[in-house]
Amino acid sequence: MKLGRHLFVVLIMVVLVYVGLSCMIQHMAVYSRFEKLETDEAQKNLQRCSEAIEREIFHLVSFTRDWGWWDDTVAFMSTGSQEYITANVSGSTIEDSGLNVIYFCRNDGAVAWRYCADAQGKQIELPQLPSERLSSKHILLAMLDGKDCENSIRSGIYMTDYKPLLVAAVPILTTNKQGIQAGVLIMGKFLSDDLVEHLSAQVNVPFTIAQFASFAKKQEKGAVTLKRSDDSIETSTVMADISNKGGLLINATTKRDITKQGTAAFNWSVASLCLVSLLSMLVLSIGLRKIVVKPIRCLTEHVVRVAQTDDLTTRITVSSKNEIGTLAEKFNYMTDQLQGARIKLLEESYHHGKSEQAAGMLHNVRNALTPVFTRLSTLSEQLNACPVGNIRLARGQIKDQNVDEERRADLQKYFDLAYEQLLETFENSRRQLDDICGRMHNIESFFNAAATHMRTHRCSEVLTLRQIILNASNMVPDELSQVFTLDQSHLEWLPSIKVDGVTLSNIFANILINAAESIKASKSDNGMISIRANIELKDSTQVLHLVFADNGSGLEPNALKNIFDRGFTTKHHSELSGLGLHWCANAINELGGRIWLESEGLGKGARAHVVLPVIVCKQMEAVNV
């Protein structure tokens, strides 16, 4: 997978993980807070409903207490006068107060007067509140029994067969709450649908009620239960009745507006998060593409092209100052180092190859000369062993007339034996010399084979012409490089070429040395060597045509004919330097090219033309990182 796609996939995965984690965290941390807030609100609404009922009971207690702690009520319990009932307990009073139950009871439970009607004002009978007498142990008989009047008040919810009754029972006392208890005043309101609706409107919470006789069938007192639906939360609790045996089940309904707002906020948050994530991913993608992916792709393409074309002459244009720019700069530096090392290695390999071939040839020559030396030594010993002096002495004595015949005969016999020995030594020497000649021919064949081997092994590399000229100029001795200025401004446009760089550097160096020596000989103060080059097409083959022009001493026409011959030179032997134009001509011929010189005469400079077949490398586009 390419780097751009890889980064894009990673960005998508990061965005998806980020959005997923954010949504999960928001749902757990934020949306759950909305739910908890809504639950708390539902519980508070239920509590307000309970408080509304308790508040109604409180007002009922206050109203009952005002009537029960009144001198007129005490007098009524003593006399039973109907005037009290007519004056105080009229229809308007009952209607305005909303009372459904009024009982004036004596201390023994006997009912002095009662009023019990439903919500429509129709008289009803309640088994829980007999019309004649209440039981002495009835829970609503609020007796002092040694307690103060406040603690004797009984209030709460009283369950009846008709409806739950909000009831208050106070002992009947004088206005100053002194004296003997005259009875018990019981007042109550049925918790009817109208009252429940009225209370719901007060607290702005719709709720319903239901009564039951035993807690065991429902739930614990005061406990709150929740029941959720899509649109609302139903909360319920139990208010115990005054007997603490049964109770009133209150069901309040709270709309789920908070969670709806939380859901809307959560959805907007997720939508904005997705939008911001997409925009961030787009910005990051564009930024990474521009800052990272594109430079790395260009750098990769450049490296691949260098690897494929073996062209170490192209460079990366570095514009960024980040790590990728540093990498590109270091790659350019590495390419420079590699090219320099390659050129140096090729030069060393070139010279080492020559040295090794020379060492090999010398080794073979030495091996071939060893038997020659042995035979020459043997031949020398044999020749030195010949009694040449004795033979000459014997020959002289034989010619001497004073020597007797017997001695002359012995000398003649000695002379004949020595002569035969000399003939044998001559024949042996001739054979030894023939063998030595054969071995010398073998030595000459070694040199021919080595020369052929040197011509067949060439190492090509991709270089620019300016680099080759630079390498050649570095090979010019310092005392010669100071006498001329090198003009190679016309080589800028030339592409890279694949050539034998080491050989060409030596050839061009030799041409520059000869031109510099010519300038030095002319004693010119403004020495100039100008190099021009062009890629030409010759016989469907691309060739490089170079012209080295100098303003030196020039050449005579006769010298132009012999300038490339072996051993020919226009300089003194003490001034000889370089490899020689003869070697240059042979090297260029081996490369498939040719060289010639032009000069208009002495003092008019010279021009060296070099034509070489080359492989022109495809120009690589500049890479900007």
Image (spheres, rainbow, N blue to C red):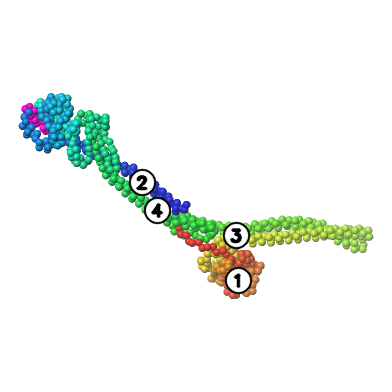
Which amino acid type is shown beneath numbered disc 4?
Leu
Q: Is residue 375 visible?
A: yes
Image depth: mark 1 or mark 3 in front: 3
Q: Secondary structure at mark 3?
A: loop
Q: Name the residue rendered at 66%, 58% in the picture.
A: 358
Determine which of the numbered discs, if any, sits on residue 459 in the image. Answer: 3
Image location of residue 53, percent across then percent down: 19, 36
Image depth: mark 2 or mark 4 in front: 2
Q: Name the residue rendered at 68%, 60% in the picture.
A: 449
Q: Secondary structure at mark 1?
A: strand
Give yes or no for contact between labels 3 and 2 (Cβ–Cβ under 8 Å).
no
Q: Earlier in the sequence, mark 3 or mark 2?
A: 2
Q: Look at the image and give the residue range highlighted in magenta.
A: 66-79
Q: Earlier in the sequence, mark 1 or mark 3?
A: 3
Tell me if 20 is positioned left or right of 460 in this view.
Answer: left
Instruction: Quote the CA–CA distance across marks 1 and 4.
Output: 65 Å
For label 2, the residue is 22
Which amino acid type is shown beneath numbered disc 2?
Ser
478 above or below 145?
below
Determine which of the numbered discs, if any, sits on residue 284 in the image. Answer: 4
Tell me if residue 18 is in the magenta stretch: no
Which amino acid type is shown beneath numbered disc 3?
Cys
